[in-house]
Image (tube, helix red, strand yellow):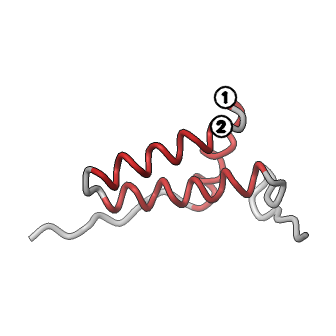
Amino acid sequence: MNQPRASRITPDDIRQIAFTLIDRHGARALGYADLAVEELEGKGETASAEAWKALRSEIVDALEGRIGRAAGRIALH
């Protein structure tokens, strides 16, 4: 039986990916993340869908100004 592989992606990596997507696509990055989650869940790829959900959460926080590019910089509102 195959066990799931441990992720080597860090929270800082997720944040950097989120800001890269925002830099390239603006607010549309959120729609792309939604589409990825929907497609992956439809294929039964739960682990990958969960990773995209985490990325989506970072995108939302970045777009709403709750997080900044620098690691550890969080804005409380």
Answer with left or right where residue 57 lies relative to residue 23. left
**Total marks drawn?**
2
User: Which residue is pictured at 82% across the width and 65% down the height?
Assistant: 74
Q: Position of residue 2 (x, y in %)?
A: 14, 67
Along the horizontal axis of the image, is 38 left or right of 75? left
Against 25, is 69 above or below? Answer: below
Q: Nearer the viewer, residue 5 or 60?
A: 60
Q: Is residue 62 above or below residue 10?
A: above
| Quarter of the figure that contains the N terminus | bottom left
- CB within 8 Å, label 2 to label 1: yes
Q: SS at mark 1?
A: helix
Q: Which residue is mark 2?
A: 20
Q: Residue at x 44, y 51 (%)?
A: 37
Would you identify the image quadrant in which residue 11 lies? bottom right
Say which mark, if any, is on residue 63.
none
| Nearer to me, 16 or 23 | 23
| Label 1 Cα neighbours within 10 Å, binned few <14 / some 14-19 / many ≥20 | few
Three-letter residue code for mark 1: Arg
Q: Residues within 10 Å of mark 2 (few under 14, many from 20)?
A: some
Quarter of the image where the C terminus is located: bottom right
Q: Which mark is residue 24?
A: 1
The location of residue 61, given as percent across then percent down, is: 73, 58
Residue drawn at x 56%, y 54% as measured from the top left: 55
Indicate left or right for 38 with 29 as reference: left
Left or right: 40 in relation to 63: left
Identity of the residue drawn at 62% across and 44% down? 30
Under tag 2, what secondary structure?
Answer: helix
Q: Position of residue 73 (x, y in %)?
A: 82, 62
Q: Amino acid at mark 2?
A: Thr
